[in-house]
Image (cartoon, coloured by chain):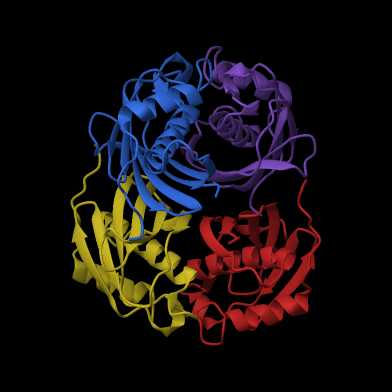
Chain colours: A yellow, B red, C purple, D blue
Amino acid sequence: MAIDLAPVMDAEALSAFFAEAFPHGAQDVHAAERFTIAPGFVRIAFDPDEAGLRPGGIVSGPTQMGLADRAAYAVILAHIGPVAMAMTSNLNYSFLRAVAFRRVHADAVLLKLGRRLATVDVRLWQDDPGNVVGQATVTYAIPG
Amino acid sequence: MAIDLAPVMDAEALSAFFAEAFPHGAQDVHAAERFTIAPGFVRIAFDPDEAGLRPGGIVSGPTQMGLADRAAYAVILAHIGPVAMAMTSNLNYSFLRAVAFRRVHADAVLLKLGRRLATVDVRLWQDDPGNVVGQATVTYAIPG
Amino acid sequence: MAIDLAPVMDAEALSAFFAEAFPHGAQDVHAAERFTIAPGFVRIAFDPDEAGLRPGGIVSGPTQMGLADRAAYAVILAHIGPVAMAMTSNLNYSFLRAVAFRRVHADAVLLKLGRRLATVDVRLWQDDPGNVVGQATVTYAIPG
Amino acid sequence: MAIDLAPVMDAEALSAFFAEAFPHGAQDVHAAERFTIAPGFVRIAFDPDEAGLRPGGIVSGPTQMGLADRAAYAVILAHIGPVAMAMTSNLNYSFLRAVAFRRVHADAVLLKLGRRLATVDVRLWQDDPGNVVGQATVTYAIPG
């Protein structure tokens, strides 16, 4: 592969970048996000707040899709650095199982990191990585 | 077509149903939604609030996708009635243009209303229906 | 919109380009394709051959998706000219109804024609434009 | 998980079923497909023929998408048996890298096998599983 999958940001830098990019008060800001970074990979551990709660004690669809989008963004930034202005061009989300109102993990894997487009597979899971509750394929445009 | 595209709910009934289904405080509740219904069609006129605001004065991705999902849900319910428990199984969203922080319209068209699956095309636009800012294809599972 | 939606190719030029780009013998070459062009729009009238026939007298999934992809490609080329090397980056296809083994139309509408990305809505229909048998959203990358 | 991921068909049975379901002469019939089955997983090793060849020595888009669809179908059938009439409802495909005209592998993983819907992640790769050339998320409807 022509892709250099060595991360260029650590979890702390990513966290600081996100805190600035999504200021307090915005819909999908969540103080309680923690990042784990590896080559070609970012995991977000996410604790939903009341804004994402639905009747029946489940996490809303927009909250799930927002989390998947941030995880995709995170794994791209972790590998190209915070200077680039990447923008989501397409997000395909499959709702697989009801998401209980407790910690959700989002595992983002870089499928392609091109000069202009990046494609990321994201799986949301709870309790155990095998219990996948949602899957997203996300494409970002990377301005040149 | 084997599909009966005559709506069975009017805008008032749909509005009342949504107000109950998405109680105050939830992430994508928006008092300022107005519905227009026609055979095979629902339009939502939506005024975003601060929760969906992003730096630069644009509407967030999750807010856009949530609106598209609600519009799809609305056009299905308008044609099968509020009794059915429909659930999103897949949502594919293309981000086409930045969405300015003012009124957004979502036009939902029933492509298929089967016994078990419904597929809806949704286009988000501003100012003029020709200025499409986002497009979604949404599939709902309809429990039998 | 910043998009100039005046076509720069006519049906004859488009037809000649496709004949050369998809030489005889390739899987989705179809002599029996006719193009109709309008601003922001291309329609292909397509007569399937035996290679796309499935038991039960229906048109295969890959044939449908290939047709949707060609229609998206056609509407982009019709508006930027045959010089550009556009490539599909994402195709999302919803199978709505069985496609009978007779003429299928594919209506492609440009949702966005950017400098680097183009997004196209394609609907396949038979007999009547209201009888939509499949829907695709197709994103092309346009090399700069 | 409520899903029983023990396969109920072996590679030979799957191969025989496909040979019958896609009779000789159809567009995406390929004698040269070999199946590997594991819990929740099917791999197809596929050797493209001339029908899927494109100028430049690459494998066509419809051939890639058809392979992804068959792999999704195979992993579902392998776990529910050949009696069920499953039908693709949605296929989302990301073209990541040019596919050279030689053996392609398709790895299909069951994300969800519900009573009515199954969702499958498929990755096409060449030479090495890390060299992913295409990714599909495929949803099948399973008639009750």
Q: Give the side of residue D143 with respect to residue C2, left or right.
A: left
Q: Give the side of residue A37 with respect to residue C27, left or right.
A: left
Q: Can residue B126 be seen in this view?
A: no
Q: How many marks?
A: 0
Question: On screen, B83 above or below C67?
Answer: below
Question: On screen, B29 above or below C144?
Answer: below
Q: In which quarter of the image is the N terminus of chain A?
A: top left
Q: Give the side of residue D139 with respect to residue A71, left or right.
A: right
Residue A136: quadrant of the picture: bottom left
Residue closest to the eye, B17 or B133:
B17
Question: On screen, A57 above or below D68?
Answer: below
On the image, the x and y values in percent for residue A141 come to: 43, 51
Residue closest to the eye, C60 or B101:
C60
Q: Which residue is drawn at 66% across and 52% down?
A: B114
Q: Residue at x 65, y 33 (%)?
A: C78
On the image, the x and y values in percent for residue B47 come to: 64, 77
Outermost top residue = C24
Residue closest to the eye, B22 or C80:
B22
Q: Which residue is drawn at 37% across and 41% down?
A: D122
Residue closest to the eye, B90 or C35:
B90
On the image, the x and y values in percent for residue D61 come to: 47, 30
On the image, the x and y values in percent for residue D78 come to: 37, 38
Outermost bottom residue = B24
Q: Is residue B97 visible?
A: yes
